């Protein structure tokens, strides 16, 4: 049964939409604002999200950006009673599946939800096919030496765990290949693998790059940005060439690896 999240600060709107959608046999959850919606999206998978624009704490325009990072394939239907054409265009540019003005035409809303779910199903099928292709194209570790056999055994042993893994080796020895094998054999294989070239990040930017920042947290922070740790949530974080970082940057990463366990990435 499809699950829909209604995000609106107006309790009467949420109640009306819930009754209609439950009558259509959908499972429905509610959120009074964008912040609460983000919590629910992290805890529960949704087939469609109905998102109001004008809300306290976090409005719909900011919420859609964050939701799209957490679950980019979930269709989002924006609704608002104070919007104009420019608002609708901006919402679609940010990735909204459709925009409906309040009070919503219920027939149009139901048709939009069905169309959004059809799109979501197509995306899911595409990902399944891409995964099959990816699995068939995974590079093998070719060789029969004792050293290579030990690497294969080590990968098989550590991949199912939540351990942080340090891969040593000279350039060209296949460190990235080992990292991808660990990811593909892990319980997080369905999640993303996020690669970071540590040597290319200045020490003064490392915290923002890895841990993100909020809008307005410093002069040039014009919008919220998720860090690599959070982007790798549910998957694997591959920190390449970590030894080429400055010592101060390495200290920040070490603190991050020790204290950012809630991101559930693999360092």
Image (cartoon, rainbow, N blue to C red):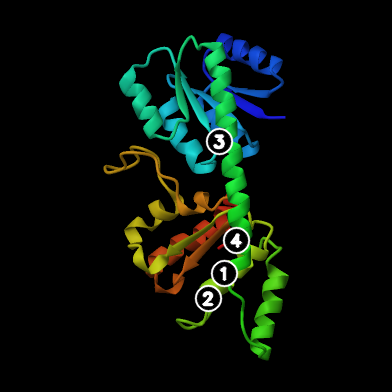
Q: What distance separates the C-alpha of mark 1 from that of mark 4?
A: 19 Å
For residue 179, the mark is 1
Q: Position of residue 259 (x, y in %)?
A: 56, 54
Disc 1/disc 3 C-alpha distance (Å):
33 Å
CB-based contact (under 8 Å), mark 1 and mark 3:
no
Nearer the observer: mark 2 or 4; the answer is: 4
* Viewer-side label of 1, 3: 3
- The image quadrant where one finds the C terminus is bottom right
Crowdedness near tag 4: few (<14), some (14–19) or many (≥20) residues, C-alpha within 10 Å: few
Among the two numbered marks 1 and 3 on one chain, the one whose residue lies closer to the N terminus: 3
- C-alpha separation, residue under disc 2 versus residue under disc 4: 23 Å
The answer to which of marks 1 and 4 sits earlier in the sequence is 4
Which residue is labeled 4 in the image?
A: 133
- Residue 119's tag is 3
Q: Which residue shows up at 58% across the image and 41% down it?
A: 122
User: For the image shown, how many numbered marks are present on the structure?
Assistant: 4
* Residue mark closest to the camera, 3 vs 2: 3
Which class describes the residues within 10 Å of circle 3: few (<14), some (14-19), or many (20+)? some
């Amino acid at each position: 049964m499809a699950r829909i999240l209604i995000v609106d600060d107006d309790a009467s709107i949420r109640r009306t939409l819930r009754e209609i959608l439950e009558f259509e046999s959908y499972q429905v959850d509610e959120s009074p604002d964008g912040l609460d919606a983000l919590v629910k999206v992290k805890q529960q998978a949704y087939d469609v999200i109905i998102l109001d624009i004008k809300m306290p704490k976090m409005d719909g325009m900011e919420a859609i950006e964050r939701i799209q990072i957490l679950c980019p394939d979930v269709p989002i239907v924006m609704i608002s009673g104070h919007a104009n054409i420019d608002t609708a265009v901006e919402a679609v540019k940010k990735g909204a599946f459709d925009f409906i003005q309040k009070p919503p035409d219920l027939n149009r809303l139901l048709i939009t939800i069905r169309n959004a779910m059809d799109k979501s199903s197509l995306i899911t099928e595409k990902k399944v096919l891409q995964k099959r292709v990816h699995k068939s194209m995974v590079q093998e570790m070719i060789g029969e030496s004792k050293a290579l056999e030990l690497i294969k055994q080590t990968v098989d042993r550590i991949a199912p765990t939540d351990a942080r893994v340090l891969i040593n080796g000279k350039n060209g020895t296949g460190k990235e290949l080992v990292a991808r094998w660990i990811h593909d054999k892990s319980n997080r294989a369905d999640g993303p693998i996020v690669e970071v070239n540590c040597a290319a990040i200045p020490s003064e930017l490392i915290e923002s790059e890895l841990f993100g920042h909020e809008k307005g947290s410093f002069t040039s922070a014009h919008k919220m940005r998720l860090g690599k740790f959070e982007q790798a949530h549910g998957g694997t974080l591959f920190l390449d060439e970590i030894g080429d970082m400055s010592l101060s940057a390495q200290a920040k990463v070490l603190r991050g690896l020790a204290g950012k366990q809630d991101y559930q990435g693999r360092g």
